[in-house]
């Protein structure tokens, strides 16, 4: 009987300990945003071949779901807001025209003030050009957070006027 009680207590403690999280959430908590290209187009920009951040060179298209559009209007993004930065390679077609090449990667931000409270209510995720998740290290997520922390509600972009 004593052995069963000890096993039960150890099992219960194991469940309790693993139910508490002490670090940022993993990438698989942010799903690929299906249909994001039908969301509101916030704006586009292009980073040239000499830009210091090689990972964002090319076209950067920003999309927002309906809740994020409300956030752009009010300055406070409600839970459920999602913003996508679609990074597309620039492909020079001739001396006068540069078109879009293949997708390099996609950044996704998702707002859930409770689930992601350790990062100001936002989750950060990336997807490869083929839509597979790109696992971000804890250090990479901290870098995302520390940069976004300096912005109003963690958002760099504004709606195109």
Image (cartoon, grey):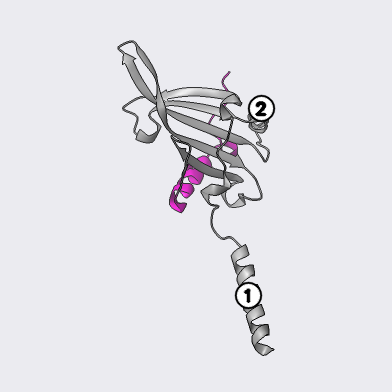
* Residue 102: numbered disc: none
C-alpha span from label 2 to label 1: 49 Å
Q: Is residue 53 visible?
A: no
Q: Is residue 92 above or below residue 29?
A: above
**Residue located at (35% from left, 24% from top):** 48
Residue 100 forms part of the magenta stretch:
no
Q: Is residue 60 above or below residue 22?
A: above
Badge 2 or badge 1: first in the primary sequence: 1
Residue 154 forms part of the magenta stretch:
yes
Mark 2 = which residue? 73
The boundaries of the magenta stretch are 137-161
Q: Is residue 91 visible?
A: yes
Q: Nearer the viewer, residue 2 or 156?
A: 2
40 left or right of 132 in image: right
**Residue located at (67% from left, 89% from top):** 2
Question: Are the residues flagged by discs 2 and 1 in contact, CB closer than 8 Å?
Answer: no
Residue 85 x %, y %: 50, 32
* Residue 11: numbered disc: 1
Residue 39 x %, y %: 61, 26
Residue 49 x %, y %: 32, 26
Q: Secondary structure at mark 2?
A: helix
Quadrant of the rendering where the C terminus is positioned: top right
Q: Secondary structure at mark 1?
A: helix
58 left or right of 72 in image: left
Q: Nearer the viewer, residue 84 or 47?
A: 84
From this viewpoint, which residue is outermost toward the top? Answer: 96
Q: Sort mark 2 into few (<14), some (14-19) or many (20+) by Cα contacts within 10 Å.
A: few
1 left or right of 45 in image: right
**Quadrant housing residue 112:** top right
């Amino acid at each position: 009987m004593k052995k069963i009680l000890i096993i039960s207590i150890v099992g219960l403690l194991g469940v309790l300990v693993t139910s508490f999280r002490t670090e940022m959430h993993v990438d698989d908590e942010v799903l690929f945003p299906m249909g994001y290209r039908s969301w509101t187009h916030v704006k586009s920009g292009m980073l040239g071949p000499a830009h210091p951040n090689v990972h964002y060179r090319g076209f950067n298209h920003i999309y927002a779901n309906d809740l994020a559009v409300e956030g752009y209007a009010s300055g406070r993004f409600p839970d459920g807001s999602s913003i996508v930065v679609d990074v597309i390679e620039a492909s020079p077609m001739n001396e006068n025209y540069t078109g879009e090449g293949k997708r390099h990667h996609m950044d996704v931000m998702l707002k859930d003030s409770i689930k992601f409270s350790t990062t100001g209510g936002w989750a950060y995720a990336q997807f490869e050009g083929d839509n597979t998740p790109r696992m971000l290290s804890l250090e990479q997520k901290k870098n995302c957070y520390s940069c976004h922390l300096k912005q109003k509600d963690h958002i760099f972009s504004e709606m195109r006027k």
